[in-house]
Amino acid sequence: MGLLRGMARTAVVAGTATAVSGRVARRQADKYADRDAEIYAKREASYEQQVAAQQQGAAPPPPPPPAAAPAGDEMVAKLHQLADLHNQGILSDEEFAAAKAKLLNG
């Protein structure tokens, strides 16, 4: 009789846990479905506004191209990078000197 009672108790606990986890899963799914629907609606509205603006000929201007850095600044940055590698011990003295000479001589 004790074995049957233990099995019945285990079945009740397992059934309750399954029901609770199923309820939690459904609540989370509903919550995320609502959030996803809201995000989709915002994106759809934004897209429709862009299409309407393009149809009216008032397309937003393209972003300006990034300004080119002067060659001197780029070289200084590379020299700093080489010096950092040398200070960290990644480049030996000979490797550092060779890389620096190559950079400076073009």
Image (cartoon, rainbow, N blue to C red):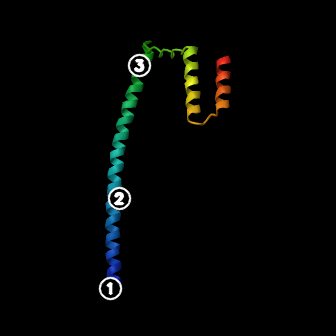
Residue designated by label 3: 52
Which one is closest to the eye, mark 3 or mark 1? 1
Residue at the outermost bottom position: 1
Q: Nearer the viewer, residue 39 or 84?
A: 84
Q: Is residue 5 left or right of residue 59?
A: left
Label 1 crowd bin: few (<14), some (14–19), many (20+), radius 10 Å: few
Give the mark, 2 or 3, whose residue is nearer the N terminus: 2
Residue designated by label 2: 22
Marks 2 and 3, how far apart in space?
A: 44 Å
Q: Amino acid at mark 1?
A: Gly
Q: Residue 2 placed where, x, y %?
A: 32, 85
Q: Is residue 19 above or below residue 53?
A: below
Secondary structure beneath label 1 = helix
Marks 3 and 1, how far apart in space?
A: 75 Å
Residue designated by label 1: 2
Q: Is residue 5 above or below residue 91?
A: below
Secondary structure beneath label 3 = helix
* Quarter of the picture holding the N terminus: bottom left
Q: Residue at x 64, y 31 (%)?
A: 93
Secondary structure beneath label 2 = helix
